[in-house]
Image: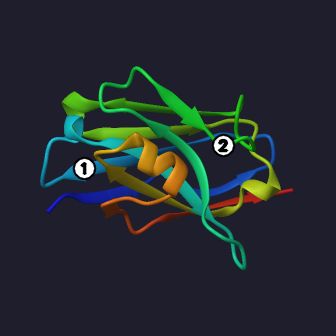
Amino acid sequence: QMQLVESGGGLVQAGGSLRLSCAVSGGASITVAMAWFRQAPGKEREFVAAIVQGGGLTYYGDSVKGRFTISRDNAKNTAFLQMNNLKSEDTAIYYCAADRSPQRLRWDKSADYWGQGTQVTVSS
């Protein structure tokens, strides 16, 4: 059973940066596409970014394009989300997810595996 553990969340001022990490255990990360989602209080889960197994293709939600970058290091079984120019509306719990199908992550917002989430709070 694959497990995902997020880290790197915290409190940051608007305009600042954070880097989230998602550590994969119980399986090789190269076998799965990986993604980040977020959910703010009272709002639906929102797709943030996804990356295919080999890392050669990425997808982004419209609200984060140009500010966030997803990447992965399969040798370390870890995925990352670099978040720059953060805004107050980026405040949410950020979840890492993994699935064999990047399309399922991107379009269905579904995944076989989910992390527990890490809080990101952006103060204005």
Q: Amino acid at mark 2?
A: Gly
User: Looking at the picture, how far across and down is residue 21, in whole percent?
Assistant: 41, 46
| Residue at point 24%, 31% (across, down) | 74
Please say if 32 is above or below 67. below
- Left or right of 42, for residue 106: left
Foreground mark, 1 or 2? Answer: 2
First in sequence, mark 1 or 2: give its number. 1
According to the image, label 2 marks what residue? Answer: 61
Residue 19 picture location, percent across and down? 53, 41
Q: Is residue 42 left or right of residue 25?
A: right
Report the amino acid beneath label 1: Val
The circle on residue 24 is 1
At which x and y percent is residue 29?
A: 23, 41
Disc 2 residue crowd, few under 14, some 14–19, many 20+, Cα 10 Å = some
- Give the structural element (helix, strand or loop) at label 2: loop
Residue 9 visible, this orientation: no
